[in-house]
Amino acid sequence: MQELGVFVTLAEIAGVFVGFGALIAVRSGGASDEQEAAYIRTVLSIGVWVVVASLVPVVLGGYDIGEREVWLVSGLIALVSIVAVWVTNYRTSYVQHVGESLSRASMVLETAGYGLLFFLLLAALIFVVLGLLPDQEPALYLTALVMGLFVSALSLLWLVFAHRSTAATSDGAEAPTE
């Protein structure tokens, strides 16, 4: 399986996101509000998911099992673990605590962004697990991982903008409105 090198590279890239998220969390002494904590949680948890899910087919590819079995097991592990991460993040998310404090535009944008990426991620993994497109399983699995990387990147971007808004408000300046 030639694509295994791509998965190792994806794991490395996701590791950078995890490192940035952890650095931001430690450097700032913790999030200033629940919204920032949710972004940090998402960057870290989805980044770690991408690292782990990227390495599963690499490890399984080293065993004497068929390519279909590699993608089936990898897809199952990735699907179950991303659902667990998503449920855990949602249960502890700022949406549960301070969602009303965000502007309606911010909530719609975030929900649409995350929703689309998670839909594509889950659809790709379901196609892999069900074996609906056997010739495309490596590409579908890669698509799922890249969507996870996009979620992590988007969360990191929103974290930066949320931090900027919080810093402007704490300095006495008026926070940007949407």
Image (cartoon, grey):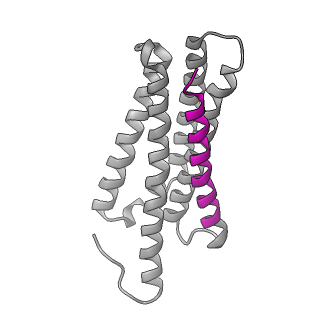
Work out whether residue 31 or residue 55 is closer to the camera in this orientation and state it: 55
* Dominant secondary structure of the residues highlighted in magenta in the image: helix
Specify whether 95 is left or right of 25: left
144 magenta-colored? no
Query: Where is residue 42 drawn, in percent x and y?
Result: 53, 51
* Residue 13, horizontal then vertical, whole percent: 57, 48
Residue at 71%, 20% in the rendered image? 62
**x, y percent for residue 130:** 46, 14
Q: Which quarter of the figure is the C terminus placed in?
A: bottom left
Above or below, 159 relative to 154: below
Count of labels in the image: 0
Over which residues does the magenta segment extend? 1-24
Q: Which residue lies furthest to the bottom in this view?
A: 172
Residue sitting nearer the eye, 4 or 11? 4
**Which image quarter holds the N terminus?**
top right
Q: In this rendering, is residue 139 above or below 133?
A: below
Residue 124, quarter of the rendered image? top left
Q: Residue at x 59, y 28 (%)?
A: 4
Residue at 32% across, 47% down: 112
- The answer, for residue 103, to whether it is visible in the render is yes
- At which x and y percent is residue 136? 43, 19
The residue that appears at 41% across and 59% down in the rendered structure is 99
142 left or right, relative to 62:
left
